[in-house]
Image (spheres, rainbow, N blue to C red):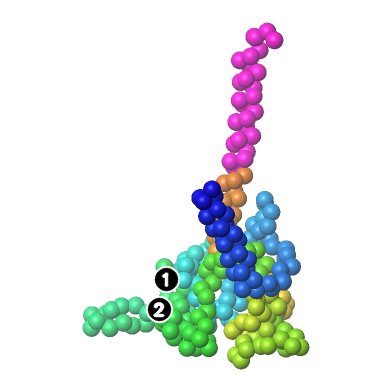
């Protein structure tokens, strides 16, 4: 009986703690579901959209947010050829070394390099952003529930002024979809923030859709291969089931029932 009572108390405490932590996390509205090209059993990435998303990342996000799990050579997966990848990499300065004198030095990036961080360390990142460290974006859409929809909502959920009666802390910005509605990041997107090379209208919503698509690829570059393998497995199982059924009919055909 004593053991049962202790178990019940522990369970009640866990439930209470979970409820409290949920309330503390804030009750931000759930962003509306968006249409993404990769949704569904046969969904795939739109290469043109991924390339536009890279433009948005480089032109808007890269000044604060790193992409540390993506190498420049990975960009061949979104439609760039080797020469284009080399040109993109060369736009970045990569710290290397030490040299023969024991000193670090900078050089143009090469295809095997990874996207460099905009800050040398977390302290420098925090000092440049009001005490907040901008998160790495490589896995961002996997780190949130309904990640792509959440990130899209976050990027488009800014309002010029907080609602009447809302106590907005100094240095914070009101965001409809951010838990607690107070975020350190200023509105990053605006119309024509990036001029697309393919002529696509550069609206806030278009920028947000494109960069979210790109970030979903950085988080799940294997998505298309995984779906392809899944389809092959399903087809194999269907054929195997048909063969086993035919074999069963053959084996039992001479048995009287």
**Residue at x 52% of width, y 69% of height:** 138
| Residue 94 marker | 2
Residue 181 in which image quadrant = bottom right
* x and y, in percent, of residue 241 in the image: 63, 30
Residue stretch in magenta = 232-257
Question: Is tag 1's residue or tag 2's residue first in the polypeptide sequence?
Answer: 2
Is 251 covered by the magenta stretch? yes
* x and y, in percent, of residue 84 in the image: 52, 71
**Is disc 2 surrounded by few (<14), some (14 to 19) or many (20+) residues within 10 Å?**
some
* x and y, in percent, of residue 5 in the image: 55, 53
**Is disc 1 surrounded by few (<14), some (14 to 19) or many (20+) residues within 10 Å?**
some
Q: Quadrant of the C terminus?
A: top right
Secondary structure mostly taken by the magenta-highlighted segment of the chain = helix
Q: Is residue 21 above or below residue 119?
A: above
**CB atoms at circles 1 and 2 under 8 Å apart?**
yes
Q: Is residue 94 above or below residue 19?
A: below
**Residue at x 60% of width, y 83% of height:** 185
What residue is disc 1 on?
113
């Amino acid at each position: 009986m004593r053991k049962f009572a202790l178990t019940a108390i522990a369970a009640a405490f866990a439930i209470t703690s979970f409820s409290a932590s949920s309330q503390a996390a804030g009750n931000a509205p759930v962003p509306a579901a968006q249409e993404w090209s990769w949704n569904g059993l046969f969904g795939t990435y739109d290469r043109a959209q991924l390339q536009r998303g890279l433009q948005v990342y480089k032109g808007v996000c890269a000044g604060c947010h790193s992409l540390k799990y993506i190498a420049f050579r990975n960009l061949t997966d979104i439609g760039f050829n080797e020469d284009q990848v080399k040109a993109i990499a060369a736009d970045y300065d990569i710290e290397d070394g030490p040299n023969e004198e024991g000193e670090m030095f900078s050089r143009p990036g090469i295809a095997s390099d990874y996207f460099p961080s905009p800050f040398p360390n977390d302290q420098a990142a925090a000092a440049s952003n009001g005490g907040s460290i901008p998160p790495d974006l490589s896995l961002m859409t996997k780190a949130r529930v309904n990640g792509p929809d959440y990130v899209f909502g976050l990027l488009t959920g800014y309002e010029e002024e907080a609602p009447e009666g809302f106590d907005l802390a100094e240095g914070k910005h009101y965001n409809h979809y951010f838990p607690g509605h107070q975020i350190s990041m200023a509105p990053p997107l605006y119309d024509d923030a990036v001029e697309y090379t393919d002529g696509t209208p550069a609206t806030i919503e278009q920028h947000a859709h494109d960069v979210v698509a790109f970030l979903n690829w950085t988080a799940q570059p294997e998505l298309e291969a995984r779906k392809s393998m899944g389809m092959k497995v399903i087809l194999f199982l269907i054929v195997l089931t048909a063969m086993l059924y035919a074999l069963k009919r053959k084996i039992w055909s001479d048995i009287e029932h």
